[in-house]
């Protein structure tokens, strides 16, 4: 007879099995692609750069361009300064970007290459720029790398050139898809607020098919706009882990007040974003957005009986998980297990993820397991001991979903076995309606399948 009693969790003092994250340089490379005419540069071996490009290409289904310092055994022993200087000279000569954004890898970090000094000694054509971020792969996650590269943009580019701040807002969108960035810009535009978004991968990794290859697509935040971010009235960081460190650096360097909000996933987080713009810039929320919100509420109400009381396991990036958890709670669902592979940030500190999710659960009168710096092996153990009705997460959750026969909704990064997702937002009211559809269809497909199984058994 099958023993279905809960098992004691396997306790580990170190190591990870199927980590719910990937390495810093991938996040840094993605952030760099959000600058107009920018070439990301991986300071390390060719293999590292090839893996990072491949992973991003598989997620976005777009060619991801990046260059590498091409370390050999000599660079591993004597340092990569010569390789980087040669690479900078060649990249400007061959590809002619406006900006080269250098990020480090495990090898260059272990060697201890002094990147700022190497850049100062490099041949940089007039009018061109080289920025950098330290992104050791053995610390943090891809979210940490994204945050570090955005901090590099602020450190190298942002300037305060006026005494009086302009009536404009900086928006740091966090590690979200180009479709999400487009939706955030649409919401800000509908509010009538002048904004500077950086990084901005819309128009870069969702560019149209024209029949002609473009090394540097038309999208991305322009350097002059990032410079002007130091003159803005406010910076809104959408997500604590991916965006807040850069916003606080901009506050220290240029005295632009920083405000951190949740990534606008779900109705409440979107409300908070719009109400912040309304309050800080004295704008009225247009009827079009009120209508979208009303439609979302109608959809949530009409389908409430499908969601109420369902137990959910969610994993992925912390900023996305915070919004997702808040949203599924608003649907009447119970987030029983919430796990991210990303550890605490530098300025945000460790523990903020667990505290925020547990506070949400407590406010709803619920309990659940919450963990940062966890892995999918541990999540699978949790689900075996306390089963759920639905799993939300990236592609790697499919193995747990198959093993435990759980409906699965793919959301987050990376999604490697499905297409189109990067064009369609999960943020804003429209994104929330899409989430309702995906969650509802997954649950209903399971319900219909179970009903069909029961009918088959009755026939037999």
Image (cartoon, grey):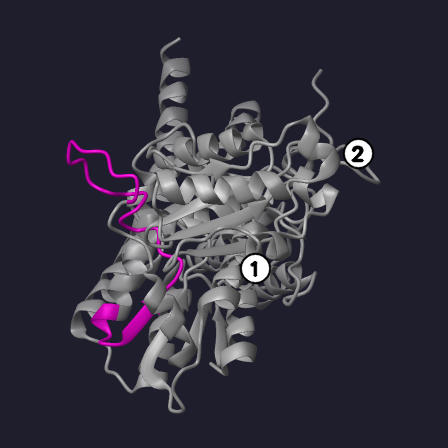
Tag 1 and tag 2, C-beta contact below 8 Å? no
Label 2 crowding class (10 Å Cα cut-off): few <14, some 14-19, many 20+? few
Q: Residue at x 33, y 35 (%)?
A: 62
Q: Is mark 2 on a helix, strand or loop?
A: loop
Q: Residue at x 24, y 77 (%)?
A: 285
Foreground residue, 99 or 153? 99
- Determine if the magenta segment contains residue 116: no
Foreground residue, 349 or 159? 159
Q: From the viewer's perspective, is 276 left or right of 81?
A: left
The CA distance from mark 1 to mark 2 is: 29 Å
Percent across and percent down for residue 74 are: 69, 30
Q: Name the residue under label 1.
A: 241
Q: Can residue 8 be seen in this view?
A: yes
| Label placed on residue 10 | 2
Q: Is mark 1 on a helix, strand or loop?
A: helix
Query: Height in image: 242 above or below 164?
Result: above
Foreground residue, 394 or 161? 161
The span shown in magenta is 189-216
Percent across and percent down for residue 319 are: 51, 57
Foreground residue, 164 or 261? 164
Q: From the viewer's perspective, is 218 left or right of 330?
A: left
């Amino acid at each position: 007879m099958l023993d279905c009693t809960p098992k004691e969790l396997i306790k580990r003092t170190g190591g990870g099995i199927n980590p719910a994250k990937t390495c810093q340089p991938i996040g840094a490379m993605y952030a760099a692609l959000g600058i107009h005419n920018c070439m990301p540069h991986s300071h390390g071996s060719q293999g590292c750069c090839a893996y990072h490009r491949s992973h991003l290409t598989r997620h976005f289904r777009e060619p991801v361009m990046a260059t590498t310092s091409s370390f050999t055994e000599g660079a591993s022993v004597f340092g990569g300064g010569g390789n980087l200087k040669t690479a900078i000279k060649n990249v400007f000569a061959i590809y002619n970007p406006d900006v080269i954004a250098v990020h480090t890898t495990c090898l260059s970090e272990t060697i201890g290459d002094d990147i700022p000094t190497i850049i100062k000694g490099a041949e940089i054509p007039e009018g061109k720029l080289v920025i950098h971020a330290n992104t050791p792969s053995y610390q943090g996650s891809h979210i940490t790398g994204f945050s570090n590269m955005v901090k590099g943009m602020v450190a190298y580019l942002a300037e305060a050139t006026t005494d009086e701040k302009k009536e404009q807002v900086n928006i740091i969108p966090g590690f979200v898809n180009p479709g999400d960035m487009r939706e955030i810009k649409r919401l800000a535009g509908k509010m009538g607020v002048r904004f500077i978004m950086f990084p901005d991968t819309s128009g870069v990794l969702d560019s149209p098919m024209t029949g002609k290859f473009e090394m540097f697509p038309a999208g991305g935040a322009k350097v002059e706009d990032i410079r002007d971010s130091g003159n803005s009235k406010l910076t809104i960081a959408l997500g604590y882990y991916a965006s807040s460190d850069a916003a606080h650096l901009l506050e220290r360097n240029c005295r632009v007040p920083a405000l951190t909000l949740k990534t606008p996933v779900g109705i409440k987080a979107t409300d908070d974003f719009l109400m912040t713009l309304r309050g800080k810039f004295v704008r009225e929320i247009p009827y079009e957005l009120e209508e979208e919100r009303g439609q979302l509420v109608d959809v949530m109400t009409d389908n409430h009986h499908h969601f109420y009381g369902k137990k959910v396991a969610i994993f992925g990036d912390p900023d996305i998980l915070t919004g997702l958890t808040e949203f599924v709670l608003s649907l009447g669902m119970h987030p029983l297990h919430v796990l991210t592979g990303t550890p605490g940030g530098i300025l945000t500190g460790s523990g903020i993820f667990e505290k925020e999710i547990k506070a949400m659960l407590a406010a709803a009168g619920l309990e659940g397991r919450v963990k940062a710096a966890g892995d999918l092996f541990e999540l699978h153990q949790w689900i075996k001991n306390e089963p759920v009705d639905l799993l939300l997460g990236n592609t790697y959750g499919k193995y747990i979903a198959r093993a435990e026969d759980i409906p699965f909704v793919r959301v987050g990064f990376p999604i490697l076995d499905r297409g189109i997702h990067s064009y369609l937002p999960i943020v804003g009211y429209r994104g929330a309606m899409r989430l309702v559809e995906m969650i509802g269809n997954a649950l209903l497909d399971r319900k219909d399948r179970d009903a069909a199984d029961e009918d088959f058994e009755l026939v037999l």
